[in-house]
Image: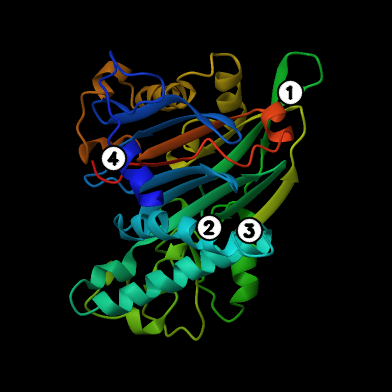
């Protein structure tokens, strides 16, 4: 049933001039769905490609469990992000269908089961595709179940809540996800505490803090070469190999998890890969959503980020749009944005049966 729904929705594509708000439309390297109903309310979704192969993946599921959002920002290729997008929801669905239902522990297990499966895949492909060992994914998941929101994250994608400020008409930005990027002081301190005998656990390289001088994030799905010594050797690319022996995993796939009881003042949620937050602040993003119609919100956020990326390079947005993938990566990263508009009346009714949908974006570009 789930796979048939995935095929149905992936086939629902229309040109920008003729499609409905829920159809997938395309403008060059941009794909978007302007407004679609889900169990928690409505959502707007958009992705724009910058890499030669799209490394961002994303997924929205809606059904008896509520609404599930997954944003998977790949690095070192698309393999880990595609695997996480394929498998993390399946693990979540299997675990949450048990007697405990939807819980933080169940979401954590879904992350760790996905990690275990991907590392097994790395082992199986080691002799034929060793580069899979250097592929990883920042993975951000949001689950709206009844009136509770769960946010789970590894890496530096971000979930931000737009919250109404009293009756002022203003909106406040509240970051819900914990980021695991070595450029954050707390993350560097955490790594140093976990690896007290390694003076090079974090290295400042070209003005950017990196774990072992290689990777910015301290948590991810994949990156097997940073977790298992048997993959830290030839034939993987020399730039990934760590010369010092490691006695324990450097990175972890264990997510930070927050649970939040949704309030009537909680207006919308923005889930986005790091590519968006490189160019927009939390407050800028929520004000763009708040001050414009719901329809097209995700696409509007991506456009604002691209305008800012073009400005930083002293060029026009119209010129940036004409730059093709791969070369585009010199200006911005792949960007995924999903905006969920919360319908508190719908959630209060406890609508357990729908609408049923499954949408995956950016499988291939």
Q: How is the image coloured?
A: rainbow
User: Does the rendering let one see residue 219?
Assistant: no
Distance from the alpha carbon under mark 4 to that under mark 2: 35 Å
User: At x 66% / y 44%, what residue is drawn?
Assistant: 176
Nearer the viewer's eye, disc 3 or disc 2? Answer: 2
Q: Residues within 10 Å of mark 3 (few under 14, many from 20)?
A: some
- How far separated are the C-alphas under marks 3 and 1? 26 Å
Which residue occupies 29% across, 38% down? 50
Label 2 crowding class (10 Å Cα cut-off): few <14, some 14-19, many 20+? Answer: some
Which label's residue is closer to the chain start, 4 or 3?
A: 3
Residue where numbered disc 3 is placed: 256
Q: CA distance from mark 1 to mark 2?
A: 32 Å
First in sequence, mark 1 or 2: give its number.
2
Query: Which quarter of the rendering shows the C terminus?
Result: top left
Q: What residue would you read off at disc 4?
A: 329
Of labels 4 and 2, earlier in sequence is: 2
| Residue drawn 47% across the image and 37% down it | 278
Q: Are marks 3 and 1 in contact (CB under 8 Å)?
A: no
> Would you name the residue on which mark 1 appears?
164
Residue 145 drawn at (x, y percent): 66, 46
Picture layout, residue 348 above or below residue 83:
above
Whichever of callouts 1 and 4 sits on the residue coming sooner in the sequence is 1
Which mark identifies residue 150? none
Reply above or below: 45 against 311.
below
Q: Which residue is mark 2?
A: 93
- Secondary structure of the residue carrying tag 3 is strand
Q: Secondary structure at mark 2?
A: helix
Q: From the viewer's perspective, is the residue at label 1 or at label 4 nearer?
A: 1
Instruction: Say whether residue 293 is left or right of residue 177.
Output: left
Residue 322 x, y percent position in the rendering: 21, 23
Tell me the distance, in whole angstroms, between the alpha carbons under discs 4 and 3. Answer: 29 Å
Do labels 4 and 3 touch, CB within 8 Å? no
């Amino acid at each position: 049933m789930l796979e048939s729904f995935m095929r149905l929705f992936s086939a629902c594509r229309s040109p920008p001039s003729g499609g409905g708000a829920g159809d997938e439309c395309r403008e060059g390297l941009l794909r978007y769905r302007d407004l679609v109903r889900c169990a928690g309310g409505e959502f707007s979704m958009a992705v724009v490609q910058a890499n030669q192969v799209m490394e961002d993946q994303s997924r929205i599921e809606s059904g008896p469990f509520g609404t599930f959002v997954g944003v998977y920002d790949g690095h070192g290729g698309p393999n880990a992000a595609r695997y996480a997008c394929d498998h993390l929801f399946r693990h979540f669905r299997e675990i949450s269908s048990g007697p405990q239902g939807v819980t933080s522990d169940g979401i954590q297990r879904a992350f760790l089961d996905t990690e275990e499966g991907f590392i097994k895949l790395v082992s199986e492909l080691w002799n034929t595709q060793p580069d899979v060992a250097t592929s990883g994914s920042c993975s951000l998941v949001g689950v709206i179940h009844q009136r509770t929101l769960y946010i789970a994250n590894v890496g530096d994608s971000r979930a931000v809540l737009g919250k109404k400020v009293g009756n002022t008409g203003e909106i406040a930005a509240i970051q819900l996800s914990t980021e695991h990027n070595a450029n954050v002081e707390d993350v560097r301190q955490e790594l140093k505490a976990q690896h007290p005998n390694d003076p090079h656990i974090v290295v400042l390289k070209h003005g950017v803090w990196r774990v072992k001088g290689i990777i910015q994030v301290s948590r991810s799905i994949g990156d097997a070469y940073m977790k298992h010594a048997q993959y830290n050797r030839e034939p993987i690319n020399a730039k990934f190999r760590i010369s010092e022996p490691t006695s324990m995993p450097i990175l972890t796939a264990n997510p930070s998890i927050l649970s939040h009881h949704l309030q009537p003042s909680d207006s919308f949620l923005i889930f986005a890969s790091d590519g968006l937050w490189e160019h927009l602040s939390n407050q800028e993003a929520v004000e763009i959503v708040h001050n414009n119609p719901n329809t097209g919100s995700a696409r509007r956020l991506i456009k604002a980020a691209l305008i800012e990326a073009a400005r930083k390079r002293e060029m026009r947005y119209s010129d940036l749009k004409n730059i093709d993938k791969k070369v585009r990566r010199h200006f911005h990263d792949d960007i995924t944005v999903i905006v969920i508009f919360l319908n508190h009346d719908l959630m209060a009714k406890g609508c357990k049966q729908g609408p049923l949908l499954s949408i995956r974006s950016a499988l291939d570009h």
